[in-house]
Image (spheres, rainbow, N blue to C red):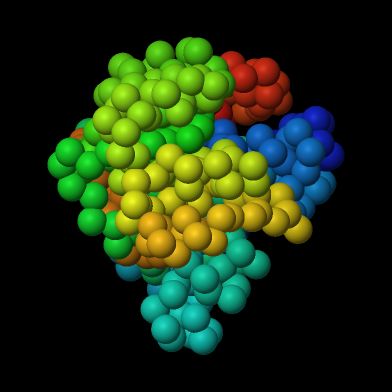
Amino acid sequence: MKASFLIRPGKIELLKTKIPKPSRGEILVKIKAALTCGTDLKAFIRGHIVIPMPGVFGHEFSGIVADAGKGVRKFKRGDEIMAVHSAPCLKCGYCQKGLYNLCESIMDKKVLGAFAEYILLPPHIVKQNIFHKPKNLSFKEAAFLEPLSCVVHGMHGLKIKKGDKALIIGAGPIGLLHLLLLKDKGADVIITGLEKKRLALARKLGASVAVAPGKIANAINKFTTGLGVDYVFECTGQPSVWEQSVGYLRRGGTVIMFGGCKSGTTVTYNTARLHYDELTLKGVFHFTPDDVKEAYGLLKAGKINVSKLISGKYPLKNTAKAFLKLKKGEGIKYAIIP
């Protein structure tokens, strides 16, 4: 089969490799659509700790079951499926506490290689995080299951209700997915970002206000009549923005630190503001099987329309072209079609 290998930052090669054969409990999926992602883009630009090089990459996908190993009961050859690339072990100390997203082996046993003709899913994923694709979803839309699961997890436990004011910092694909989910929950959303085209799209998707970072303070003051927002969703992964985020909150508000900062960085906060204004700073990471089920339900029911986040498609041989466009700030997500 053919697969896109990330050789080093900035260099992708289409190479031939053997089609894997599924062992007991495994499923071989023929990829129908795979989506570009911010983590993939970081790896393409500068490398990433969770994406080995040289090696296959890509982890947002959907497809058709090409073969199934012994013991697989729920899926058969020819089934159209959507899945995510990881699942918890269910055995470690964190899993025993129900903290499945923090499973000790979840990153070590993740599956990469969606930018290819086939991908092999191991038993722990097959048992927990693979679903039949409904007919109302295209393969490209179904491939949003993984990023939407992450966004769902970030809002888990928040009592977001109709009329709440939320700020999204970062109008990239994850920020726009936050927008779609917040609108589904009835929140009133303001979003900030650097790209004018992305801000224009955010308005079309339901943002009440979409402005450049330099105008955000005045916009929030007007948006909340001086009170501050109920929630901030930080989606840039920049320490300086993490620090700025608390300044946009009302008293008793919450910041969700979704964007991951570079390893080793630190941030500083005004302790009086955190203490006396009773602010909540919440870091979020990955997702649980329940988050995946919720994301699947949202997509299946048509409650989250992700189609407008797909900026175009490329054949497998042109995977690098998609990432070069993203590097220039062009587009939201591209579908790679083997």
Left or right of 294 in this view: 110: right
Is residue 128 shown above or below 254? below
Is residue 294 shown above or below 39? below
Pick the front one: 247 or 175: 247
Check the picture and name the quadrant holding the C terminus. top right
| Residue 204, visible in the rendered structure | yes
User: Residue drawn 50% across and 60% down?
Assistant: 272
- Residue 87 coordinates in the image, percent (x, y): 48, 66
Is residue 129 shown above or below 52? below
Number of callouts: 0
Left or right of 194 in this view: 98: left
- Residue 249 coordinates in the image, percent (x, y): 39, 45
- Residue 214 coordinates in the image, percent (x, y): 54, 21
Is residue 241 shown above or below 308? below
User: Residue drawn 41% across and 62% down?
Assistant: 276
| Residue 309, visible in the rendered structure | no
Pick the front one: 277 or 98: 277
- Residue 291 coordinates in the image, percent (x, y): 34, 59
User: Residue drawn 70% across and 56% down?
Assistant: 266
Pick the front one: 167 or 276: 276
Pick the front one: 260 or 177: 260
User: Residue drawn 71% across and 50% down?
Assistant: 262
Check the picture and name the quadrant holding the N terminus. top right
